[in-house]
């Protein structure tokens, strides 16, 4: 049973959502400056791994928390590859081709996929509101995509956003097992480490061609690209992850997930203010976004808790946060 100070927990989740929301716009500025999605994924993972590794060593019990057994390796590698490598990379591809708010809406359907997996994959009982949530989310996505019109959304961007949602859902399922075996800090540290290794391997053959020259450049507004990358690592990854983990001491995981859905709304607003009218959502898309979030909220609360699974894992808003984790996630 989660206990503590609920008001503090709510504040921590909202603060994390705001940091993740700003991170979407900052990441898009970095991508516009010439850094590629795989490069930004690698920078984020390597920077977050180093920062969290240092924090893990400083806090008690220090290095003992980082011990890994061979039995844990498959889970840590899978957890890191899905939630900390594939989700953010697909998210970066999506926001490079779609408005930030729309890309996040596609990714935020992940909890709905988890609820469907619980029903059909794990044969768990779910409340009937899951089906209403599914209908609302599908209707909302149809409004976001404006299926009655010319389908102006970039196809690759949509596929990347839906792909991020799929991997984020897989990350949730693995995370539910991971948090039973390890503390949150060490689990996240090694997950970022696995992501960094994957980033190094995938960039090994192309780093010379793409180059890291844009890191020394400035944006059109004169902001150093390296400084923006620093935000992605520290304020867009490490700090919000720690805030979400801290919030779980004061709130149930389901509450954290639902409150965290302020992120797409904040992200769309920040992107519109900073990046201009191209990020704005029209009335149909705004209505669709609210339908998606309402559907996800219903799905989040549709699972019937089991004695050994009192709560599903919370979203990681950007890839995920973050969720997060996600993402996203």
Image (tube, rainbow, N blue to C red):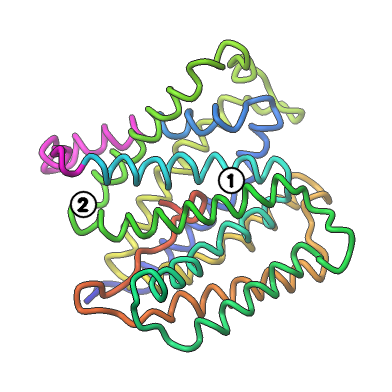
- The image quadrant that residue 225 belongs to is top right
How many badges with numbers are in the image?
2
Q: Name the mark on residue 91.
A: 1
The one of 248 and 66 positioned closer to us in this rendering: 66
Please report the bounds of the magenta region as a residue range. 47-72
Mark 1 crowd level (few <14, some 14–19, many ≥20, 10 Å Cα): many
Q: Helix, strand or loop at disc 1?
A: helix
Among all residues in the image, which is located at the extreme top? Answer: 208
- On the image, the x and y values in percent for residue 194 come to 34, 34
Mark 2 crowd level (few <14, some 14–19, many ≥20, 10 Å Cα): few
- The image quadrant that residue 251 belongs to is bottom left
Between circles 2 and 1, the one closer to the viewer is 1
- On the image, the x and y values in percent for residue 250 come to 30, 69
Q: Which residue is depicted at the point 44% across and 72% down?
A: 115
Q: Which residue is depicted at the point 41% across and 61% down?
A: 12
Real-space CA distance between mark 2 and mark 1, rounded to the nearest whole angstrom: 26 Å
- When the figure is inspected, residue 93 is found, relative to residue 298, above or below; the finding is above
Q: Which residue is depicted at the point 41% across and 30% down?
A: 198
- On the image, the x and y values in percent for residue 124 come to 34, 78
- When the figure is inspected, residue 237 is found, relative to residue 262, above or below; the finding is above
Q: CB under 8 Å between callouts 2 and 1?
A: no
Which corner quadrant holds the N terminus? bottom left
Q: Name the mark on residue 183.
A: 2
């Amino acid at each position: 049973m989660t206990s503590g100070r609920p008001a503090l927990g709510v504040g921590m989740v909202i603060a994390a959502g705001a940091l993740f929301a700003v991170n979407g716009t900052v990441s898009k500025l970095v991508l516009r400056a010439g850094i590629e999605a795989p490069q930004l994924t690698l920078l984020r993972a390597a920077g977050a791994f180093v920062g969290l590794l240092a924090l893990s060593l400083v806090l008690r019990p220090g290095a003992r928390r980082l011990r890994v057994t061979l039995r844990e390796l498959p889970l840590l590698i899978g957890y890191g590859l899905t939630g900390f490598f594939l989700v953010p990379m697909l998210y970066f591809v999506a926001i490079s081709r779609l408005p930030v708010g729309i890309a996040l809406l596609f990714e935020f359907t992940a909890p709905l996929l988890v609820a469907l997996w619980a029903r059909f994959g794990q044969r768990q009982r779910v409340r009937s509101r899951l089906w209403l949530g599914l209908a609302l989310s599908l209707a909302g996505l149809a409004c976001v995509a404006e299926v009655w019109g010319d389908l102006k959304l970039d196809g690759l961007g949509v596929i990347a956003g839906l792909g991020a949602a799929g991997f984020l859902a897989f990350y949730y399922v693995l995370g539910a097992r991971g948090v039973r075996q390890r503390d949150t800090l060490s689990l996240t540290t090694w997950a970022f480490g696995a992501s960094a290794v994957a980033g190094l391997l995938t960039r090994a053959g192309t780093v010379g061609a793409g180059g890291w020259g844009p890191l020394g450049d400035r944006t059109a507004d004169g902001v150093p690209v390296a400084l923006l990358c620093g935000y992605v690592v520290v304020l867009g990854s490490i700090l919000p992850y720690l805030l979400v983990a801290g919030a779980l001491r004061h709130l149930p995981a389901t509450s954290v997930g639902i409150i965290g859905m302020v992120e797409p709304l904040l992200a769309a607003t920040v992107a519109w203010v900073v990046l201009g009218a191209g990020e704005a959502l029209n009335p149909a898309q705004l209505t669709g976004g609210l339908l998606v979030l309402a559907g996800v909220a219903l799905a989040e609360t549709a699972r019937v808790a089991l004695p050994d699974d009192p709560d599903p894992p919370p979203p990681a808003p950007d890839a995920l946060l973050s969720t997060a984790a996600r993402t996203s996630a």
